[in-house]
Image (spheres, rainbow, N blue to C red):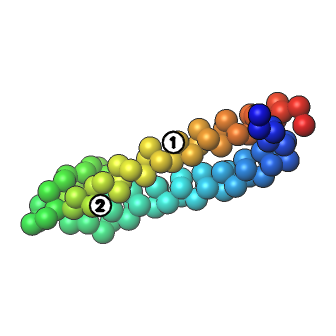
């Protein structure tokens, strides 16, 4: 049988996950604004994915499109891990 994780370790893990959440949230917002301001507004060779960003349509490559879609679920998963770890640390016996 494994030894339960201590409350102190859970709190440290929650702090690290909290920092990761903040970094991922800032990165996701930055990426959307960056694409919205720097990508072409007309379709070009290799830029086939139309994305509407702040009432402006820009065209993204396959890699840019995949990155934009991957950032959101990764951020949501880390938020969930943070909340779960923080709650577990709060209600852990010691």
Could you tell me residue 49's position as x and y percent? 19, 53
Pointer 1 local density, CA inside 10 Å: few below 14, some 14–19, many at least 20: some
Q: CA distance from mark 1 to mark 2?
A: 19 Å
Q: Nearer the viewer, residue 1 or 71?
A: 1
Can residue 6 be seen from the camera position used here?
yes
Q: Which mark is residue 31?
A: none
Observer able to see residue 60? no
Please identify the quarter of the rendering in which residue 79 is found. top right
Quadrant in which the N terminus is drawn:
top right
33 and 68: which one is in front? 68
- Where does label 2 land, which residue? 64
Sequence-wise first label, 1 or 2: 2
Image coordinates of residue 40 in percent, x first then y, are 20, 66
- Callout 2 environment at 10 Å: few (<14), some (14 to 19), or many (20+)? some
SS at mark 2 in the image: helix
**What residue do we see at 65% from left, 43% from top?**
82
Instruction: Look at the image and tell me in which quarter the C terminus lies.
Output: top right
> Could you say which quadrant of the image residue 47 lies in?
bottom left
Residue 91: image x %, image y %?
82, 30
Looking at this view, name the residue that lies furthest to the left: 45
| For residue 83, side relative to residue 24 (left or right) | right
- Residue 66 placement, left or right of 80: left
Q: Residue at (61%, 55%) from the top-left corner? A: 20
Name the residue rendered at 81%, 39% in the picture. 3
Q: What is the count of numbered marks?
A: 2
Toward the right, the furthest residue is 94
Residue 72: x %, y % from top left: 43, 47
- Residue wearing tag 1: 76
Q: Nearer the viewer, residue 81 or 4?
A: 4
The answer to the question of whether label 1 and label 2 lie on touching residues, with beta carbons closer than 8 A, is: no
Secondary structure at badge 1 equals helix
């Amino acid at each position: 049988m494994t030894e339960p994780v201590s409350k102190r370790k859970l709190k440290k893990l929650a702090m690290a996950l909290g920092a990761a959440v903040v970094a991922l949230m800032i990165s996701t917002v930055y990426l959307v604004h960056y694409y919205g301001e720097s990508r072409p507004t007309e379709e070009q060779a290799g830029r086939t994915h139309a994305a509407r960003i702040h009432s402006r349509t820009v065209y993204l490559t396959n890699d840019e499109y995949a990155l934009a879609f991957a950032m959101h679920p990764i951020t949501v998963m880390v938020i969930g891990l943070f909340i779960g770890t923080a709650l577990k640390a709060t209600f852990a016996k010691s």
